[in-house]
């Protein structure tokens, strides 16, 4: 069971994702976990389908006076356990199937940490590096206006993802509020503090990643201060995870981003690297206090912990064999394919699966939403304390499930999540 790769069936509308793509992988993982918990055919069919999808094509007036058309997507995979929740990605490779995969993983993630949300995701096909600040603002506002029929504090609450940040969230909050005539801070999370953001949200995903690494090391009788780490991706998730790990005594020997990587066996000074990154157009390549390393070679470094915090499909059947880390922490969504999972398990490598490892972001987004609805704000200590409590407890619940069912951690997390969503569906019943 644990080593089988499930075969795919088309969705009701005939969708059949290409093998190896994130959506094919998300569906394969789902089928495998559904087999594990003996999910009946009707429930299985219901849960593998996205609930609703909206694709919009919209114009943006560019600085040079021209009009440019963009495509934006939002997918709600599930609204069974509450409003749908999920980030918005601005990236040239966004497509409907990728967003479907990410939305499905959001459903499982919210269920793993047991917060009252379903899963969603959104994106715009765009390279934001090519836009001015004004163009980026116009694109965000128009996308939000087009999606206003889905967004809402009780229905669908977006958040940051790749290439979107607190400023983009503030524009979303403002645009949605303009359609209502009053401020609606709880419509989006990951906002700046000045417009109803939460203390600790910016760091929450990276901090959550570090809590799960701490727990995985504890199970091996080690602590963060004992280990070497490599981090792929130096954005919101990767840079925070790298800094917190270094602060707690880990030796971060390599980091990389889309521009390439840097390595230093003595350990990188993450604060200094971050300052360089800021001055160097948000790129780590060319940093002098280390040697250049490619992304491919970073993945194969002999470190204790490898943090994946970039994009999907980084460890695959063709490169997983090169991995020499003992623990893989999936800060990114979907960084490991099912073929790679099998290879890594054979090598005895422990994977902290995405739906658990990076759930700190949505957990503090939930705290931000609760604070916004109550107009009552918590201290950073309170946020971090509650985050630690939820992440540690979810980690233990997933590991207990893995032991009880004798499956790998990804299957355990997904089985736990699918069971929770299926139970909620049965309790609600099928309308009408
Ligand atoms: P980000 O845009 O802040 O950073 C992405 C980083 O990945 C950048 O350093 C970029 O240069 C790098 N990158 C992009 N393509 C790469 C490539 N081909 N090889 C190596 N590096 C590459 O995004 P983020 O918010 O840090 O998100 C990173 C991952 O974490 C994504 O998978 C995202 O879905 C996931 N995630 C983010 C959050 C969040 O709160 N931001 C929460 C959960 C999961």
Image (cartoon, rainbow, N blue to C red):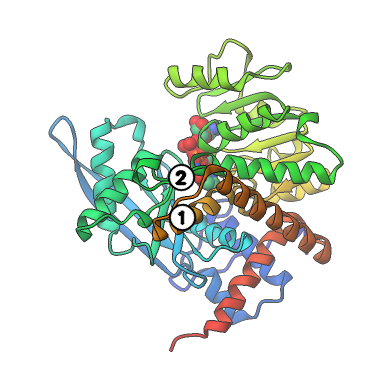
Q: Which of marks 1 and 2 is nearer the N terminus?
A: 1
Q: Which quadrant of the rendered structure holds the C terminus?
A: bottom left
Please count the marks in the image: 2
186 left or right, relative to 62:
right
Q: Distance between the residues labelled 1 and 2?
A: 8 Å
Residue sitting at the far right: 221
- Residue at point 66% right, 77% down? 39
How would you rate the neighbour count of disc 2 (Cα within 10 Å): few for under 14, some for 14-19, many for 20 or more?
many
Asked if residue 92 can be seen in this view, the reply is: yes
- Residue at point 70% right, 50% down? 339
- Residue at point 46% right, 45% down? 161
Residue 332 in the image: x percent, y percent?
A: 58, 43
* Mark identifier at residue 86: 1
| Residue denoted by label 2 | 161
Q: Nearer the viewer, residue 258 or 181?
A: 181
How would you rate the neighbour count of disc 1 (Cα within 10 Å): few for under 14, some for 14-19, many for 20 or more?
many
In the image, residue 346 sits, relative to residue 44, either above or below, namely: above
In the image, residue 286 sits, relative to residue 399, either above or below, namely: above
Residue sitting at the far left: 65
Label 2, ligand 1: CB separation under 8 Å: yes
Asked if residue 192 can be seen in this view, the reply is: no
């Amino acid at each position: 069971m644990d080593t089988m790769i499930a075969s795919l069936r088309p969705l009701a509308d005939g969708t059949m994702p290409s093998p190896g793509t994130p959506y094919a992988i998300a569906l394969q993982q789902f089928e495998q976990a559904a087999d594990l918990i003996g999910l009946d055919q009707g429930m299985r069919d219901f849960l593998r389908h996205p609930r609703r999808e909206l694709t919009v094509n919209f114009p943006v007036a560019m600085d040079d006076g021209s009009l440019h058309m963009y495509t934006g997507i939002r997918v709600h995979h599930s609204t069974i356990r509450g409003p749908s929740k999920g980030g918005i990605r601005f990236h040239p490779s966004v497509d409907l199937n990728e967003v479907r995969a990410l939305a499905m993983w959001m459903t499982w993630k919210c269920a793993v940490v047991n917060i009252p949300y379903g899963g969603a995701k959104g994106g715009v096909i765009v390279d934001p590096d090519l836009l001015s600040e004004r163009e980026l603002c116009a694109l965000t506002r128009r996308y939000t206006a087009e999606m206003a029929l889905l967004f809402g504090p009780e229905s669908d609450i977006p958040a940051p993802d790749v290439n979107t940040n607190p400023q983009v969230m503030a524009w979303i909050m403002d645009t949605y509020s303009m359609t209502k005539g009053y401020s609606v801070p709880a419509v989006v999370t990951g906002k700046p503090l000045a417009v109803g953001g939460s203390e600790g949200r910016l760091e929450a995903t990276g901090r959550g990643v570090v809590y799960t690494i701490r727990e995985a090391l504890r199970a091996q009788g080690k602590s963060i201060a004992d280990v070497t780490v490599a981090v792929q991706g130096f954005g919101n998730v990767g840079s925070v995870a790298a800094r917190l790990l270094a602060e707690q005594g880990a030796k971060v020997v390599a980091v990389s981003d889309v521009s390439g990587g840097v390595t230093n066996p003595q350990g990188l000074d993450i604060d200094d690297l971050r300052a360089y990154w800021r001055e160097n157009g948000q790129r780590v390549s060319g940093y002098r206090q280390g040697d250049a390393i490619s992304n491919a070679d970073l993945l194969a470094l002999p470190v204790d912990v490898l943090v994946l915090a970039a994009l999907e499909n980084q460890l695959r059947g063709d490169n997983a064999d090169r991995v020499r880390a003992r623990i893989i922490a999936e800060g990114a969504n979907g960084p490991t394919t099912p073929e790679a999972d099998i290879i890594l398990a054979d090598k005895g490598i422990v994977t902290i699966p995405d739906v658990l490892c990076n759930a700190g972001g949505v957990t503090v987004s939930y705290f931000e939403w609760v604070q916004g609805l109550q107009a009552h704000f918590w201290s950073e200590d309170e946020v971090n304390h509650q985050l630690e409590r939820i992440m540690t407890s979810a980690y233990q619940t997933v590991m207990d499930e893995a032991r009880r069912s004798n499956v790998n951690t990804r299957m355990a997390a997904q089985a736990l999540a699918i069971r929770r969503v299926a139970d909620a569906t049965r309790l609600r019943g099928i309308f009408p």
